Amino acid sequence: MTTCSVVIPVHNRAALTARCLDALFAGTEEALTEIVVVDDGSTDTTPAVLAARAPDIRVVRHERSAGFAGSCNDGVAAAGGDWILLLNNDTIPQRGWLDSLIRCASGLEQVGVVGSKLLFPDGTIQHAGIVFTRDLIPQHIYLGFPADHPAVGKSRPFQAVTGACMLIRRGLFEEIGRFDTGFLNVYEDIDLCLRLRKAGYEVHYCHDSVLYHLESATRGVEWDRRNHDRFLERWAGFVYQDDVRYYAEDGLIDVAYPGQFPAIIRVSPRLAVLHRERRNAAERLLAERSRQVYETLKENTRLRVELLEAEGRASGDPPR
């Protein structure tokens, strides 16, 4: 029987943790045999939330915050499953999410890591694989696309996938060296994926595994420059630009040659607009409205979480 330990690193945001655990308990995933939660020095009601769910979960407690990488490493060390599923506490798994990942991974000969399709609360794409720009900056491909768009509806390899929901064999995680704690709450997942690829393993995105991800509800963007410099120092000679290749593969960019240059480039309006200085008023308004909706969704998520936590503190009960 395939066994899988779900490892969830948490730091405060007790209401998010409670919601994620409730979704896991409500599921019917056959492979899920254990839930390990690493409490990374939380100072809110997180300890009470976790205690209320004992003995259905295992808890690893850090007295001081060790960060994402250290928490995941300690959680995996405490886990006993054949597979490890690393999961953010600001996710809401949907039916079949884990079994789909296991099936996908089991069908690949040189599988290293498999990642899921992650959706924003409005149902648009948050993660469907990670690509790299010309400047080697990682980007979530098709961010904001509809969840049913053909480009995100096919499982395929990428250079990296997000650690917000990442499946890997336990033995391989230890063999490859675990997460590098030199990165601080960003790039750990990408670094792990690239180490796996350098060792000859594949990194895949599984479109059948779906979760909602309340991204940015649990952490900020500190240390991005420091982490990116560390990333480039290690991987500038190995990672390569691949964003345009996927857009062409998915039919969103096409280049026609009429016999004499300049070539004719056709770009899907869903993918791109004209250069910023040349956009018309309608395009500028649409871009601004899209940004406002995105920021509003993030703010609403943050406020809902804070309200749930405040209600829990006022009642003396942990968030349920």
Image: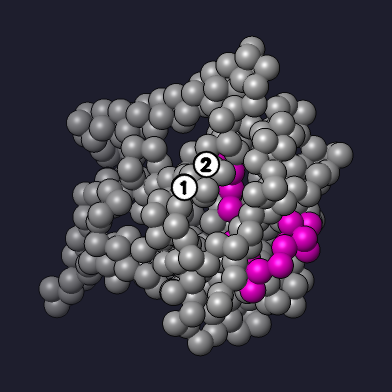
Magenta-drawn stretch contains 223: no
Q: Position of residue 157 (x, y in %)?
A: 44, 73
Whether residue 277 sits left or right of residue 110 in the image: it is left
Quadrant containing the N terminus in the rendered view = bottom right
Circle 1 sits on which residue? 26
Q: Crowding near pointer 2: few (<14 within 10 Å), some, many (20+)?
A: some
- Residue contact between numbered discs 1 and 2, judged by CB atoms under 8 Å: yes
Point 71% across, 31% down: residue: 48
> Which of 131 and 272 lies nearest the eye of the viewer?
131
Residue lying at the far right of the rendered structure = 63
Circle 2 sits on which residue? 22
> Which of 315 and 156 lies nearest the eye of the viewer?
315
Amino acid type, label 1: Ala
Quadrant in which residue 196 is drawn? bottom right
Q: Which residues are magenta?
A: 74-91
Quadrant in which residue 150 is drawn? bottom left
Q: Is residue 263 visible?
A: no
Q: Position of residue 260 (x, y in %)?
A: 17, 74
Point 70% across, 27% down: residue: 45
Q: Position of residue 13 (x, y in %)?
A: 63, 32
Rendered view: 318 above or below 255: above
Q: Considering the numbered disc 1 on the image, is that residue within a helix, a strand or a loop?
A: helix
Amino acid type, label 2: Asp
Rendered view: 311 above or below 206: above
> Which of 156 and 108 lies nearest the eye of the viewer?
108
Q: Position of residue 89 (x, y in %)?
A: 59, 43
Spatial CA span between label 1 and label 2: 6 Å
